[in-house]
Amino acid sequence: MNQKELNEIRRRFNPEKTNIGKVYGCYVNTAGNVVARTEVPLSLEADSEKEKYLAILKGALGGSLGKNLVSIPFSTADAADNEKHKLLCELRRTSLADPELREKLFSAIIAGFSIEDANLLILLCDEVYDVPRRSKNDDDDGSDSVYHYILCAVCPVKDGRADLGYDHRDSAFHITVPSQLVGAPAVGFLFPAFDGRTANIYSALYFTKNAGEIHEDFVDAVFGTPAPMSSAEQKDTFCEVLAETLEEDCSFEVVQAVQGELRNRIAAHKESRDPEILEITPEEVGDILATSGVEEEKVAAFRTKCGEKFGGDTLLPANLVPQNRVTLETPDAKITVAPDAAVQVETRVIDGRKYILIPADEDVEINGMNVHVK
């Protein structure tokens, strides 16, 4: 899915646009036991509650593509052999109406996911969306296709914090404890994916609130496929491959050149408003290394190792380099500079010692106090 397709589905969770009939819920305690099951007909709910349910469900489509939202591909063989994929397809085919199928999914989620010291609320809904045709002016021009999807949101539920509150009954303030509160989704998914503005049953869109944590057990329990790398794992693996293959050529200047080019591509992609996720191949990164003076043998080793570690997949620049900062770190110091100022940073050996030099022509502060550099 690209950004425009994602935004189109996000808009379905507007109370005035949605066709969602029921929201099914399963409330689970910290021991993994089901406390309650619910069926909420949205059309009969008060507007405030309907909006809240839709807002929580929409949260399972939050964050950024490639970071919080990652594609879970299924092979064509999964249609015949993967029981998890079969279950998702059956849930969609029956519009979630079969309680036994719902229980199978709830059980899989309970077995594959938990949050310490929090109960869980699993919400499940489906919608049939008449996909409008787009005219040359990007206006709606009738509809000739239907997108039927299911969406799941798994939310932590915690006790409210005890605090001083006003009691109208005796016109006084007392310590009160609010009832249990449903938090934003921690994980969730959309199935099937909305690719090319149509259903792709060989792909799901998986959501994790913490982009650095992919929750492998949940992915295995719900999708029956290997979990993709989290954004943090992608960055760490990329850095590891660079260091291992370049060895002594993994210099400050080379890394600065690679990260600078990745930032430039991210900025250009953002400016272009291209809805597709920005990707880069190991071959392209190798070209950057070669331009930076790295010998061809090590460039080839990098490309090979990258292919092995990432399984032939393309890389996502947004996951490989921070876009708004450059951090320089030694065992005793940590310095953060803006990307535009990173080109002014240099390394130098003075009297046999290695130094990182940062220009200090402007004002300098130490713990908020202006100081003079003599």
Image: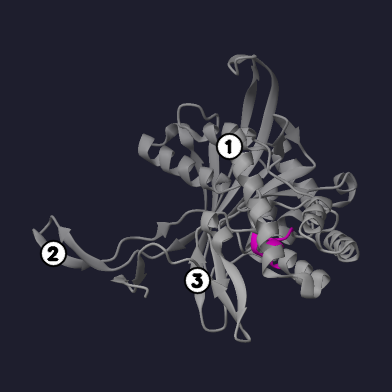
Q: Which residue is mark 3?
A: 335
Q: Measured from the top left, where is residue 32 in percent x and y?
A: 58, 68
What x and y, as percent, mark residue 130? 63, 23
Q: Quadrant of residue 91?
A: top right
Q: Is residue 259 above or below residue 199?
A: below
The stretch drawn in magenta includes residue 229: yes
Q: Nearer the viewer, mark 2 or mark 3?
A: 3
Marks 2 and 3, how far apart at CA = 48 Å
Q: Residues within 10 Å of mark 1 (few under 14, many from 20)?
A: few
- Residue 93 seen anywhere in this rendered image of the structure: yes
Q: Is residue 5 left or right of residue 156?
A: right
The x and y percentages for residue 6 are: 61, 37
- Label 3 sits on a secondary structure element that is strand
In the image, what residue type sits under mark 2? Phe
Q: Amino acid at mark 3?
A: Ile
For marks 2 and 3 on the same chain, the one whose residue lies earlier in the sequence: 2
* Marking on residue 271: 1
Q: Residues within 10 Å of mark 3 (few under 14, many from 20)?
A: few
Task: Using the image as rendered, state which of residue 291 and residue 152 is in the foreground.
Answer: 291
The boundaries of the magenta stretch are 228-236
Residue under the image location 64 percent in, 34 percent down: 274
Crowding at dot 2, Cα within 10 Å, few <14 / some 14-19 / many 20+, comes out as few
* Secondary structure predominantly adopted by residues drawn in magenta: helix
Q: Nearer the viewer, residue 320 or 11?
A: 320
Mark 1 and mark 3 residues within 8 Å of each other at the beta carbon: no
Question: What residue appears at the point 72 percent right and 45 percent down from the top-left corner?
Answer: 204
Q: Which residue is mark 2?
A: 173
Tags 2 and 3 touching, CB below 8 Å:
no
